[in-house]
Amino acid sequence: MKKAILKYIFSILFLSLVCTIARGQEQDQNDELFVQEEIKEPLQLKGISFGVNIGRFSDYVFKPERVSYEGAFNINLSNKYFGIIEAGYATTNLNKDNYNYLSEGYFIKAGMDKNLLKKYPSDFLGIGFRIGNSQFSHSASNIVIESERWETTQTSIENESHSFYWLEASFGLKGEIFKNVYLGWSALVKINVSGIDKDFIPYNIPGFGKYSGSIKMGVNYYIYYQIPFNRK
């Protein structure tokens, strides 16, 4: 009786071991097939896009002292990765009762976006990273300094040139509204990495925006046209 029980237990253990090994081999085969499929699908050029930041045009209404333009160029790799270059130009002419402020300059940003969508690869929902640089100059004139003890004086700050760097992370979405025409937006977090002159803080840094600290939040609204390649 005991021998029969031991034999029965041994048989169950043996069958369990065989099934486990078989499942492991099947999983290894599936993993190998998955790796082979990944290797067989290299990144392909799906298109290049040109875009305009339409959010900049709101400055005419909400920030009339500032005029700015921004455009973008990106390369679509298998609808998964997007190489990005963004550039623009901005001027500020701010007139107050006790000073006049002028600035102008340009900026450029370079980085990459990653599409997290798989079901609808022609659209975009993902994250991005940029490195930005702004070259600008600014000055102030007719600065009125009032004092209760001394006479009111007037001075100015000569034109100064600066180079400003920042890092930028984004999360956004983009959808095809017409064939090869896309509309999208992105939420941005910008981090100053080059410091700032505390004695003469710029009112607006091209590409970065109004300086209010080392970290700045923002939103971009873009419209793109994609020149398609290999599109099914």
Image (cartoon, rainbow, N blue to C red):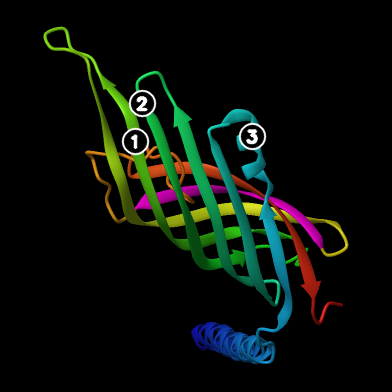
Q: Is residue 195 left or right of residue 135?
A: left
What residue lies at 55% left-to-right and 60% top-to-bottom?
87
Judge whether residue 122 can be spotted in this image.
Answer: no
Magenta stretch, main secondary structure class = strand
| Residue 120 drawn in magenta | no
Which amino acid lies under the numbered mark 2 shown in the image of this protein? Tyr
Instruction: For marks 1 and 3, give the one nearer the viewer.
Output: 1
**Between discs 2 and 3, the one toward the N terminus:** 3
Q: Residue at x 58, y 67 (%)?
A: 84
Q: Which residue is mark 3?
A: 60
Question: Which region of the structure is painted magenta?
Answer: 181-192
Quarter of the image for residue 75 reads bottom right
In the rendered image, residue 28, in percent from the top left (x then y), is placed at 59, 89
Q: Earlier in the sequence, mark 1 or mark 3?
A: 3
User: Would you identify the image quadrant in which residue 33 lies?
Assistant: bottom right
Classed neighbour count for the residue bearing mark 1: other residues with Cα under 10 Å, few (<14), some (14–19), many (≥20): many
Per the image, label 3 sits on a secondary structure element best described as helix
Instruction: Tell me if residue 46 comes above or below residue 162 in the rendering.
Output: below
Q: In whole angstroms, how far apart are the C-alphas of marks 2 and 3?
A: 22 Å
Crowdedness of circle 3 by 10 Å Cα count: few (<14), some, many (20+)?
Answer: few
Residue at image mark 1: 140
Which amino acid type corresponds to the residue marked 3 in the rendered image? Tyr
Numbered badge on residue 102: none
The residue tagged 2 is 99
Q: Residue furthest top?
A: 148
State which mark lies toward you, 2 or 3. 2
Q: Provide the secondary structure element on which disc 2 rests.
A: loop
**Residue 27, image x and y in percent?**
61, 85
Q: Against 25, is 91 above or below?
A: above
Quarter holding residue 67: top right
